[in-house]
Image (cartoon, rainbow, N blue to C red):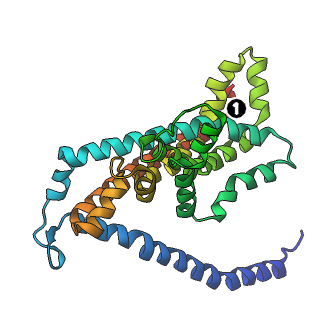
Amino acid sequence: MARPNVGNKKSSHKNLSNKSPFRTATLWLIWGWLLIFALLPNILVIAVSFLTRDSTAFISLPVTLDSYVRMIDPLYFDVFVHSLWMAGITTVICLLLGYPFAWFVSRVDKRWQPLLMLMLILPFWTNSLVRTYALKLLFASNGLINKSLLAIGIIDAPIDILYTQGAVIAGLTYLLFPFMVLPLYAVFSDLRNDMLLASQDLGASKRQTFWHVVLPLTTPGIISGVLLVLLPAMGMFYVADILGGSRNLLVGNIIKNQFLDARDWPFGAAASVLLTIAMAVLLLAYRASSRRIGKTDFNEVA
């Protein structure tokens, strides 16, 4: 009967004991970071949203729901609807452009994929505010687009591009497009070719394969991309300020104005809480879709 290797067990136990302090310190650091910079700020924002505005101290008692009731006011409700509309259009455009782009990148030769992904994330090397001002130079009446169209002879007078809803949507799409492509590229890279071949062997057409195999398996990537595009699009107030003027406001503009200009911290906090709730709903949808895909085996997909 072979003797157990006691020496190896002792050495492995010793290695684990040596690693445990570092592991414990790392976990404490991560949890402390999340507690200080993620959980506590959200708790403070939620608490402020139930307080009353004060002209000197910004917030004061008593506890009230007036800030949430004001959300129903047509003046602010219309801004919320308009903001959701522009963010929704931006998300749809990013999805329609990003889905085939991510599929193309995942299917090209392996040596070209890093180059294409580098070109995608290259704008991140420049501040988004600087890129937004660059778009303003393009969209202006005397900008590059109007000058080019006038030189070609397509138009006789400069067209109004800047300070329109289309300019805001174009700016949001330009800034947030990579955030839609990256999660889609990840799910397309993990998509197994044998599932597609099995679907074709079972007599499914390309359209049926897409609707019943590809689309369900890439749903987590779609929801993740929507999560990374929709909510940030509603909060990028500087894009609306620079490209949309005062006629195309986002929820982020309301939050900024309430905290900085109107000094109504409870109402600005209430608007922030609504965005947080929307993010939580999308996170739950992402988790549900991931669980569904995780429980789906090859036979069920085929």
Mark 1 sits on what residue? 298
Question: What residue is shown at x 76% (from left), y 20% (from top)?
Answer: 200
Picture quarter with the C terminus: top right
Does the image show residue 296?
A: no
With respect to residue 38, does 196 lie above or below?
above
Q: Residues within 10 Å of mark 1 (few under 14, many from 20)?
A: few
**Residue 35 occupies quadrant:** bottom left
Which residue is depicted at the point 57% across and 49% down? 174
Q: How many marks?
A: 1
User: Which residue is the extreme one toward the top?
Assistant: 203
Q: Quadrant of residue 206?
A: top right
Q: Position of residue 171 (x, y in %)?
A: 52, 49
Q: Residue at 66% x, 31% y: name it.
A: 214
Q: Is residue 232 above or below residue 11?
A: above
The single residue placed furthest to the left in the displayed view is: 62
Toward the viewer: 29 or 179?
179
- Quadrant of the image for the N terminus? bottom right
**SS for callout 1:** helix
The picture places residue 271, in percent across and down from the top left corner, at: 29, 56
Left or right of 46? Residue 216 is right
Q: Nearer the viewer, residue 162 or 97?
A: 162
Which amino acid type is marked by label 1?
A: Phe
Q: Residue furthest right?
A: 2
Please state if 2 lies on the left or on the right of 221 as rendered.
right
| Placement of 294 over or under 26, stated as above or below | above
Residue 293 seen in the figure: yes
Residue at horizontal 66 percent and vertical 64 percent from the top: 125
Left or right: residue 263 versus residue 80 is left
Image location (x, y in percent) of residue 228: 52, 51
Residue 135 on image: x %, y %: 55, 52
